[in-house]
Image (cartoon, grey):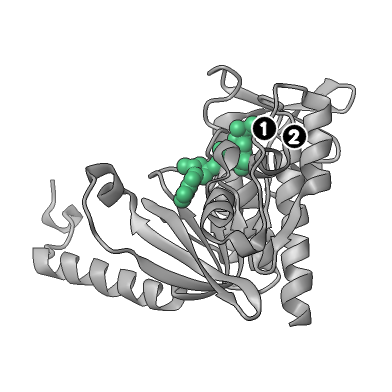
Amino acid sequence: MELRELPREVDEVTITRAIIRSAAEDWIRIADSDVVVVGAGPSGLTAARYVAEAGFRAVVFERRLSYGGGIGGGGMLWHKVVVSQPADEILREVGCRIEEAGDGVYVVDAAEMLARLATAAIDAGAKVIFGVTVEDLMYTLNPLRVTGVVVQWSAVNLAGLHVDPVAVRARAVVDCTGHDAEVLRVASKKIPEVNIEVLGERSMNAPAGERFVVEKTGEVCPGLYASGMAVCALHGGPRMGPIFGGMLLSGRKVARDVIRSLSRA
Ligand code: 48F
């Protein structure tokens, strides 16, 4: 092999400094964001894309080291998920190949869907940070408002270490954490003034669940919004299994609500 085909030698400390400098610069910007989306599942990635496209500084905190939330598991590990009209519009916008299955139903490869939703969110300008858990909220009482999130490395939580977290300010926080509605549960338990009760999702009823999740998506209290399965958990709506149109439409709806509210302010 000719020498010029080998990569240039890079000193280890150069690598370390490049990573830390760039990450720190990102975090300094992220610390004062327009929108924090919690969870990089279908609703979170969709919401982040639309708010970023509208010009708002959006960050997605994802506890795991991967995108997609429940998308990757398909339907009981078969590598496909289903969406129904009009959610196919959203998949077309991000360039996803979809297969018509009749009656307004479309089938899509789970791996392709999560990759395209993620790429589109990033291309729109959203920043996605893996390995960070949102464990609490920031708030004010006068006026009553959620003003940001409290974050910790997921690895610290997994290790059970006592390490104080740091805070990120946001004009809007969107709970896209799925079935557990983790952020809404924090609000319900630790900020009684917001008067939120998380009822827990109900058993499967796909058509009702798909409608319910979109209808009930929106602001929960000033500064705090719910999207995706967190909406069903909050309001006691049914689960719907591996049909994902409601998640995408919910992400789009919450983004529109956030954009309207932030544009007024
Ligand atoms: O679960 P998830 O995909 O939520 P979703 O967008 O979509 C639900 C569907 O996947 C499916 C369904 C469709 O009909 O029923 O289940 O509502 O994605 C939630 C993401 O949030 C992350 C979690 O790892 C997952 O990737 N997450 C959960 N809690 C936290 C979190 C947290 N406290 N901090 C950061 N990320």
Considering the image in quadrants, where does the N terminus appear? Answer: top left
Q: In this view of the protein, can residue 42 be seen by the observer?
A: yes
- What residue did someone put label 2 on? 237
Q: Position of residue 107 (x, y in %)?
A: 72, 25
Q: Secondary structure at mark 1?
A: loop
Q: Quadrant of ligand 1?
A: top right
Label 1 sits on residue? 201
Relative to 14, say whether 199 is above or below: above
Asked if the beta carbon under badge 1 is closer than 8 A to the nearest atom of ligand 1, the reply is no
Question: Quadrant location of residue 202?
Answer: top right
* 98 is higher (above) or lower (below) than 121: above
Looking at the picture, does residue 105 appear above or below residue 218?
above
Amino acid type, mark 1: Glu
What residue appears at the point 77 percent right and 22 percent down from the top-left corner? 205
Extreme residue toward the right, this view: 103
The C terminus, quarter of image:
bottom right
Say which residue appears at 78% left-offset and 54% top-offset.
253
- Residue at figure coordinates x 24%, y 45% from the top left: 160
Instruction: Residue 38: give x, y in percent of width and height.
Output: 53, 54
Q: Is residue 172 left or right of residue 134?
A: right
Q: CA distance from mark 1 to mark 2?
A: 5 Å
Is the C-beta separation of discs 1 and 2 under 8 Å?
A: yes
Q: Quadrant of residue 10?
A: bottom left
Give residue 145's position: percent from left, percent from top.
63, 72
Is residue 137 left or right of 121 when viewed as pictured? left
Judge by depth and name the residue closer to the eye, 96 or 28.
28
Q: Amino acid at mark 2?
A: Gly
